[in-house]
Amino acid sequence: MLQTDRQTDRQIDKKGHRPYAALHAHRTWREVGEELHALSLENRWSEMTDLIPDEMAAEFGIVGRLDEIGSMLVKRWGGILSTVNFPTDFPRETEEDQARVKEILSVVHGVDASGS
C-alpha cells in the first residue's frame, strides 16, 4: 500500500523517529543518501564529505567546538549513550589532547574530569 506524504509524516510524528523525520522533511537528503551509497560502493570515500550539507551532519551527528561536544552528547542522548567513537583523525597524541578526550568523556559520564 502506498502512503501519502501526510500519512508518513503522521507516523513519523507519532513514533518520534527524529532522523527519519529529518530525511522525510528534506527530500533532497534521500537523493544525497543514494549518491553517498553509490560512492561507497565505488570506494570513493573522500568525495562524500562535499555532498553532506551542514544541516544533515548536525542531524545525524554532533557538530560543535571541542569544549561543547560532551554537553551536546548528553543533551541529545542523555542516559542512553553507551559508546563514543572519535574520528580517526581526532588528536590524541599530546597530554593536552588526552585531557580533552578525558574531559569530553567525563561530561558524558557525569563526573568531574579532575577525578574529585
Image: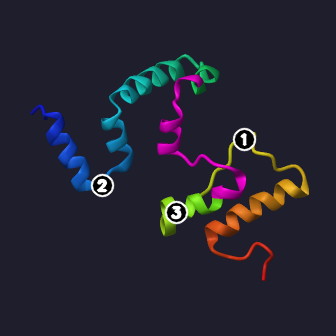
Q: Is residue 20 above or below residue 38?
A: below
Quadrant where the N terminus sits is top left
Q: Which residue is mark 2?
A: 16
Q: How many marks?
A: 3
The amino acid sitting under disc 1 is: Thr
Residue 60 is inside the magenta segment:
yes
Q: Earlier in the sequence, mark 1 or mark 3?
A: 3
- Residue 22 against residue 27 in the figure, above or below: below
Horizontally, is 47 left or right of 60 in the view? right
The answer for how far apart the CA atoms under marks 1 and 2 are is 31 Å
Numbered circle sitting on residue 58 = none
Mark toward the start of the polypeptide (1 vs 2): 2
* Residue 82 shows up from this direction: no
Residue 24 picture location, percent across and down: 30, 36
Q: Amino acid at mark 3?
A: Lys
Front residue of 98/64: it is: 64
Name the residue located 90 percent from the left edge and 52 percent from the top edge: 94
Near mark 3 (Cα within 10 A), the count class, few <14, some 14-19 or many ≥20, is few
Query: Is there CB contact under 8 Å for labels 1 and 3?
Result: no
> Which stretch did the figure color magenta?
50-69
Q: Give the residue drawn at x 79%, y 78%.
A: 115
Crowding near the residue tagged with mark 1, few <14, some 14–19, many ≥20 C-alpha atoms within 10 Å = few
Please tell me whether mark 1 or mark 2 is closer to you in this view. Answer: 2
Which residue lies under the disc numbered 1? 88
Residue matched to label 3: 75
**Is 84 located above or below residue 40 in the figure?**
below
Say which label, 2 or 3, has the lower sequence index: 2
